[in-house]
Amino acid sequence: AEGLAERGNHRDVLEALDATGLASTARALAAIGAPSEQQWVRVVEQAPSPARVATLTASEVSDLAWACAAQGTAPDQETSPGCAELLVRLAVRLQEEGVFSVASLDDVATVAWALATHGIKDRALLDRIAERVLRPEGPPTA
């Protein structure tokens, strides 16, 4: 675990990752409890430029959202303001046509949970989730 966290501390390594690699690495580092003060957190907060966020799939949005939420939930860790800003951009991306319609309910729920952990209220996203789950034919199956 220390080796992965140490490698994730190299800005050039994380910046070279594609969207899938960045999302997967961020989730893995958060899952092993890499300290939030390590550089990978700053890279996760800064690397997803608007152009990069625009390429994220629903699953990648979910992984990045989970990483941001998880890195601030341990008792000894503080919630990062940069992650809150990223979460807002991720929520916007998730709601775009072609992303939300194919997102699994798990992906949507993960993003909603991540927003809640940072105290971010996204009424539009919650309305879309409710509409999708409560539609007459029921929620979509995975």
Image (cartoon, rainbow, N blue to C red):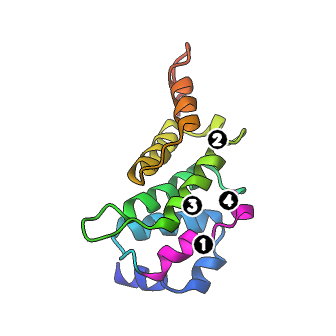
Whether the residues at callouts 4 and 3 have beta carbons within 8 Å, the answer is no
| x, y percent for residue 113 | 42, 46
In the shown orientation, is residue 47 left or right of residue 51?
A: left
Neighbor class of circle 1 (other Cα within 10 Å; few <14, some 14-19, many 20+) is: some
Residue at 37% in and 75% down: 34
Q: Amino acid at mark 4?
A: Val
Give the residue at mark 3.
86
Neighbor class of circle 4 (other Cα within 10 Å; few <14, some 14-19, many 20+) is: some
- Element assignment for label 3: helix
Span colored in magenta: 38-53
- Element assignment for label 4: helix
Q: CA distance from mark 2 to mark 1?
A: 21 Å
Give the residue at mark 4.
53
On screen, residue 25 above or below 84: below
On screen, residue 43 above or below 109: below
Q: CA distance from mark 4 to mark 2?
A: 12 Å
In the shown orientation, is residue 92 left or right of residue 74?
A: right
Which of pointers 1 and 3 lies earlier in the amino acid sequence? 1
Choose between 121 and 23: the one closer to the eye.
Answer: 121
Give the residue at mark 1.
46
Neighbor class of circle 2 (other Cα within 10 Å; few <14, some 14-19, many 20+) is: some
Residue at 54% in and 36% down: 123
Q: CA distance from mark 4 to mark 3?
A: 9 Å
Q: Which mark is residue 62?
A: none
